[in-house]
Structure formats: structure tokens, C-alpha cells
Amino acid sequence: MVALHRPAILLVAVLALPPPAWGEATTELAPGTRVRVTHPKEPASPGDSSSVQTSILVRPPIVRTSGPIAALRPATIVILPDRAPVDSLAIAWSAVRQLETSRGMKGNFWRGYGLGLVGALGAGVVYSVATGGDESGDSGAHYGGAIFVLIPVLAGVIWGIATKSERWRDVPRSAWPALSDSVEATGPVAR
């Protein structure tokens, strides 16, 4: 009887432990950390006719810029944008609407599988309408229908495996450097 209680006690002890922090990553901001910053688009230059002129009635569009941090300053965050005509971009902390750190690249297998299932549903409806719901005993027609329906699933899975998306984690404002900090963090950033 005692031998049966040991596995139960062990199971209760394991279930009582806090879950591991698999998905949790540090939100430490340092030079080299890959971030995505949501901020208002700044005019290119005062004389540029394509720049957005801000006034009381017109707000600048909100954009997202991603890249590694080049420097953290008391009033600005300097990043090396991935796709921009400039080498570095200084954004005032007061203009930052949202700050996120990269969790890395992940595949889209399940997204592709789901899209493939939706495509298969549509293909099944098309096949059913095209054949007029023929329920003859022809097994070749059933195999053709099965292949016709499986093609979107296969295409979706292949797309999901072949594509990668970057995942992001929100950095709470409490983790942002205070505007009154006098310490400036800069460092070399590999491109």
C-alpha cells in the first residue's frame, strides 16, 4: 500500500512546482539587442516636399522601425534600421509608442497547415459542384477528389515550412531607461 502512495506523492510534488519559464526572455535593453520601435514618422528634412508637415490638425503617420540598438541615451534610443536610407536613427524616448525585443525567427508550419485546410475546404466545395455530387461507384473519381483536396494542404504546409517570421515580445515602459538617467550605453554593433 505504501508503494502506491509514493508515485502519487511524487506526482503532486511535481505538479505543485511553478512552471518553467520557457517562453520568458530578458527584456534587458543593451547595444546589439534587436528591437522594433513604433514611433511617429519624422519629416526627412524641412525643405523636403515629400515630408509630412505636422500641425495641430495633421498628425504624422505612425511607423515601425526594427534593427539592433546602436546606443541608449538619456533622451533617445539609437538603432541601425534594417531597411532605411540612413545608417542610424535616433528616436526620442518621448516619441516611442511601443518597444519590442526580438524573440527570434520561427517557422509558420501551423499557419500554413491552417491555410491549407481552408484551401482544401474550398477545393472540396469546387470539386463537389464540378462533379455534381456524383456518387457513382467509380473509385477513380474518389481518388481524384482526394488528391484535388490534398493539394492545398500540401501547398500550405510547404509554404509554412519554407517561410520564417520574426516573433516579438513587448517591453513594458517600466523597463525603458528613465529619461533622467545620466548613464549612456553605447557599444559596437555587428551588422
Image: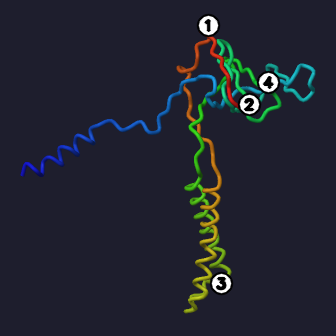
* 106 left or right, relative to 90: left
Task: Determine crowd level at label 2: few under 14, some 14-19, many 20+ residues with C-alpha closer than 10 A.
Answer: some
Name the residue at 17% across, 44% down.
Answer: 9
What is the secondary structure assignment of the residue under circle 1?
A: loop
Which residue has dot 2 on it? 81
Image color mode: rainbow
Work out whether mark 1 precedes mark 3 in sequence or the reverse, and give the earlier one.
3
Find out whether the residues at labels 1 and 4 contact each other: C-beta distance under 8 Å. no
Find out whether the residues at labels 3 and 4 contact each other: C-beta distance under 8 Å. no
Pair 1/3: label in front: 1
Task: Determine crowd level at label 3: few under 14, some 14-19, many 20+ residues with C-alpha closer than 10 A.
Answer: few
Indicate which disc residue 87 carries.
none
Which residue has dot 1 on it? 182
- Amino acid under disc 3: Thr
Pair 1/4: label in front: 1
What is the secondary structure assignment of the residue under circle 4?
A: loop
- Amino acid under disc 2: Pro
**Whole-Å distance between the Cαs marked 4 and 2?**
14 Å
- Amino acid under disc 1: Ser
Which quarter of the image is occupied by the C terminus? top right
Percent across and percent down for residue 132 are 64, 84
Name the residue at 77% across, 27% down.
Answer: 41
Which residue has dot 3 on it? 131
What is the secondary structure assignment of the residue under circle 2?
A: loop
**Whole-Å distance between the Cαs marked 2 and 1?**
25 Å
Work out whether mark 2 precedes mark 1 in sequence or the reverse, and give the earlier one.
2
Which residue has dot 4 on it? 42
Name the residue at 62% across, 42% down.
Answer: 166
Work out whether mark 3 precedes mark 2 in sequence or the reverse, and give the earlier one.
2
